Image (spheres, helix red, strand yellow):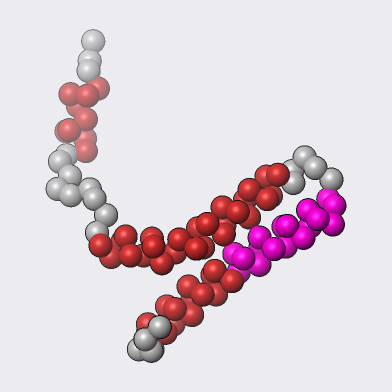
Amino acid sequence: MKYIAALQTAVTGTLPDIEPTDAELDAIVREEPLLLAEQELLDVQIALLDRPQTSLAKRRLRRAANKVLAARTEIANRAAAVRTGVAA
């Protein structure tokens, strides 16, 4: 019987540091509003899969989609401001 765990270090090797860097953590924090907005949109879409399309449901979906667009716009504007040298 072979043990897979004994072969694992040979396959993966030793990773010197698997923690995210400060820059990666900052990027996650900057994108958090977008991630939350996309999660809300997905929740609304899942909730509407087996329900009839009412005016309230359409409004919830439209509001969630607009929130995602606003978050994407904010991130893009912030990135453009950084590239042009304008402090945000």
Residue 47, percent across and down?
A: 70, 44
Q: Is residue 40 above or below residue 5?
A: below
Residue 20 located left or right of residue 16: right
Q: In what quadrant of the picture does the N terminus appear?
A: top left
**Image quadrant in which you'd find residue 86:** bottom left
Name the residue rendered at 18%, 49% in the picture: 17
Identified at 57% across, 59% down, the residue is 37
Q: Residue at 44% across / 78% down in the picture?
A: 78
The residues colored magenta run 53-69
Relative to the observer, which residue lies in front, 8 or 56? Answer: 56
Please say if 57 is above or below 8: below
Please, is residue 7 above or below residue 23 in the view? Answer: above
Question: Which residue, as the protein is rendered here, is positioned at the far front?
Answer: 56
Percent x, y for residue 87?
37, 86
Residue 70 located within the stretch drawn in magenta: no
Report whether 29 appears left or right of 12.
Answer: right
Image position of 6 with respect to 25: above or below: above
Q: Residue at x 84, y 57 (%)?
A: 55
Q: Quadrant of the C terminus?
A: bottom left
